[in-house]
Image: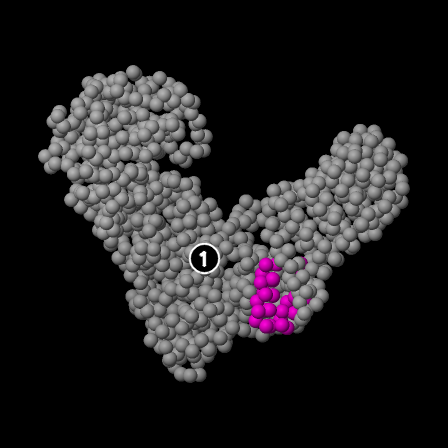
Amino acid sequence: MELGPLEGSYLELLNSDADPLCLYHIYDQMDLAGEEEIELYSEPDTDTINCDQFSRLLCDMEGDEETREAYANIAELDQYVFQDSQLEGLSKDIFKHIGPDEVIGDSMEMPAEVGQKSQKRPFPEELPADLKHWKPAEPPTVVTGSFLVGPVSNSSTLPCLPLPALFNQEPASGRMRLEETNQMPMPSSSSSLSCLNLPEGPVQFVPTVSTLPQGLWQISGTETGVSSIFIYHGEVPQASQVPPPSGLTVHGLPTSPDRPGSTSPFAPSATDLPSLPEPALISRANVTEHKTSPTQCQAAGEVSNKLPKWPESVEQFYRSLQDTYRAEPAGPDGILMEVDLVQARLERSSSKSLERELATPDWAERQLAQGGLAEGLLAAKERRRPRETQVIAMLGKAGQGKSYWAGAVSRAWACGRLPQYDFVFSVPCHCLNRPGDVYRLQDLLFSLGPRPLVAADEVFSHIVKRPDRVLLILDAFEELEAQDGFLHSTCGPAPAEPCSLRGLLAGLFQKKLLRGCTLLLTARPRGRLVQSLSKADALFELSGFSMEQAQAYVMRYFECSGMTEHQDRALALLRDRPFLLSHSHSPTLCRAVCQLSEALLELGEDAELPSTLTGLYVGLLGRAALNGPPGALAELAKLAWELGRRHQSTLQEDQFPSADVRTWAMAKGLVQHSPGATESELAFPSFLLQCFLGALWLALSGEIKDKELPQYLALTPRKKRPYDNWLEGVPRFLTGLIFQPRARCLGALVGPSATAFADRKQKVLARYLKRLQPGTLRARQLLELLHCAHEAEEAGIWQHVVQELPARLSFLGTRLMPPDAHVLGKALEAAGQDFSLDLRSTGIDPSGLGSLVGLSCVTHFRAALSDTVALWESLRQHGETELLQAAEEKFTIEPFKAKSLKDVEDLGKLVQTQRTRSSSDDTAGELPAVRDLKKLEFALGPISGPQAFPKLVRILTAFSSLQHLDLDALSENKIGDEGVSQLSATFPQLKSLETLNLSQNSITDLGAYKLAEGLPSLAASLLRLSLYNNCICDMGAESLARVLPDMVSLRVMDVQYNKFTAAGAQQLAASLRKCPHVETLAMWTPTIPFSVQEHLQQQDSRISLR
């Protein structure tokens, strides 16, 4: 049969007259047209290709676009056709393509229902995600050898011998399952024949491996359509030993190019398959079924666990990679504390913007990654689709320990705690900002990591074949240039093709290179996330140290330093400085505090820590600066500032002004060799140190104009800033360096003579800060102003800032870290007035929330319901009665808007707390938050609304002061008639209800009837009733008209956009004449003729048609 061009979809291929067997061998036919027919004889090497031939075939397929497209169509056809549930077992093998006439004549039996019964096809979405470049997946556990196919004349007389231990273990997913066999002794002179029963399901047979025992195996399966299959390996047996094959000639199967004697382009050789154990190690002679000894089972398991065996070069590379990552830092650098991993999510920065930024969950809403790192990565790996690259982002502020965490991931893999990955590669992103177009994927994996790795081409080929077993870590992702373009840049079509590093990264993020691997990124969240991070499959956030973990770190630091006698004293120093204690949630700052405490305790017992971050770093750098070359610190500060302007933290050795400055900086630990970088590349040990040095340059430099200096405080609108505040710690350090006394600040670092410009800059900044109006600043800017005022330690600036604070402070949606809560509390105490705080969606921790709530100047506060209830419970358990009473009396939820099911559940917990409180002996009365709630909105939408509304109804009666109940939402709550019926039953207890909004809730005549029955209970209080845009017809309008005269307090009623006709409208108008107290009746609806509406309005002007 002649094949035309392979075009169109797989349905066209299926409906064509093309023989599927010929489709599988179209590649061979194109290259070897006119080849003579081939007979499958029983020579051992007749149908065998080796690994090199198979690899060349795949390379040819990848290199030739036409061939690749042809095989893609064939793969789609194969996936589509072989979904039939009836075509299972051996019928899915290549042998099912060979018809009975071509192979074994009439002796081959086929199930009758296969050709008669129509099979259900899968939907397109059930097929693999990328069939275009589909390749044969990793082969399952295989039975190998040269094979013969033919009928068995008397299979019952053939003895059954055992299979290797490979089949004795429980196979993994995707491997075939074989039933256990029983061996019978055989004379050594006879041919070794073994029988194997197959269960239902797919089985794959691939030739050939050289370690199988010589002989012939008979394989039979139920409902496979094949009576028996012989698998033969070794020398050709004599005719007396083996049933003679009949009709073994197969026509029209040309040999694959460069594969002598092979008709299958997908048949790997023995060198491409894992080696099996020697036959002597896997035989079970004279062992009956189900009577294998435990020792033998254990040995079999050990052998099985080693499969598949890697090539020697891959094994050596694997061990060297483990050794690279297994080494742990010595001394204090090796202190690792287990911190919580929080599952993060994104949200829109505004309703009009498509940009997404990191959401700020309430403390109780945080979803911790259960099981830590290993379980989190394993769960993320299991959720992804096959052959699909997965991007996981780990976010955290500067100094939270992201790089240490990335190193811990590598060490965990090296120690065997991440078995789902065969290889882990960790690359610092500052190494990837290199020019040139001569990089390949192997350069990214092997040359840019912690230290260069030597890997052969065989290792790279092995890694590329199994990308799903590869974890690639990109640390400090924010240091990459132009990150937004990775999803749109062009990349090389093949891993081996050279391109720029940017092109390689684009290929990874576009899931074209190393497709199926796991990308793990660490980055700082700064406002909106770049597209590469916002489209990540999983987001986690490092939470930093808790107070207990920070104190434990201090103890371990001094233990590793050999100064255990100073542990208690160091903790006492830290506790004496609450501001530094609040900053100890950052591992970097916690270590800086320990370093300074160690230096101070060595000097004497009168040591005392500074009260600001500026003082902390001045104390760390003071002695190093005095012992350095003249002007060395100022030159290093200039380098730090210039690098920060370019979003970099690494520098070359030749960028130092002199070798003496470089040697001094390296000796004092101010710069160090960066992991993964070249020998000439150095980096600052921490981002905060670079920020401090950058601020030091701004304070000392005469190149910065005085009038430009205030713009670097990042308190002005973005368009007026000369830079994007990448060095986000600069504003606080700059005010501290400028305003703190010269003798213990700038003078201690560079000497009195180098501070000539500082006085003039101090006047400029003081004038600017005192001109600011804190009440006009956004929440994030206000917090930054408070931090700058605290670092300045200047009384005039501090008093100006705190006295200008507005009485109502809202931090809604602004994250409050422990240092923010501390400096805010200090400012509120110093202000001398009462404040009302809104702390919702700030993520404030329980300790910070308790400290702010306990301030006498805070009279009211709003916070997440779940966080507040948890705080009350904690205070009750610790016996802090006064603080508990204050927290209960100050808490308010007015007004409350339920936007999720959790909001309704939290409101229910609040009501339950009140009921528990009222029933106790030591307290009495209602909670002020419940008692004083006057406005309640319910906006959950059409899906969650009907589910959550019954829960809301059950607690409505607890709000005795409720005046406004709004059940309208833009997306429609759709509480329906059932919801109205439940709500009407609560009306007798809602004595204060003045406004009831039931708009857009799919209420029909039945709901209107139930509502009319309950409305008389609200006759004395209800002022406004809205039933806008429902499904009320004439019967419902009649029910409302009947109750309208009884509503003596009602002033406004809205029944617009319903479905009643002129008859219903006339009934409402007639009832309105009996209600002189009603001011407006809005009832325009398209089902009423306009002339009728005009006529009714002329009769009564209170009828509104707008």
Residue displayed at 37% across by 52% down: 474
691 versus 51 height, above or below:
below
Question: Residue 398, how many percent across, how many down?
Answer: 45, 60
Question: Hey, which quadrant is residue 524 in on the image?
Answer: bottom left
Magenta-colored segment: predominant secondary structure: helix
Residue displayed at 79% across by 34% down: 1035
Quadrant for the N terminus in the image: top left
Residue displayed at 47% across by 73% down: 615
Magenta span contains residue 385: no
Q: Is residue 356 visible?
A: yes
Question: Residue 586, how many percent across, how many down?
Answer: 45, 65
Q: Which residues are magenta?
A: 865-893
Circle 1: residue type = Leu
**Secondary structure under the numbered disc 1 in the rendered image:** strand
Q: Is residue 890 visible?
A: no
Question: Residue 991, how many percent across, how many down?
Answer: 78, 54
Residue that numbered label 1 is attached to: 341
Give the left or right position of residue 859, taking residue 639 as reference. Answer: right
Q: Residues within 10 Å of mark 1 (few under 14, many from 20)?
A: many
The outermost residue toward the bottom is: 605
Quadrant for the C terminus in the image: top right
Question: Hey, which quadrant is residue 108 in on the image?
Answer: top left
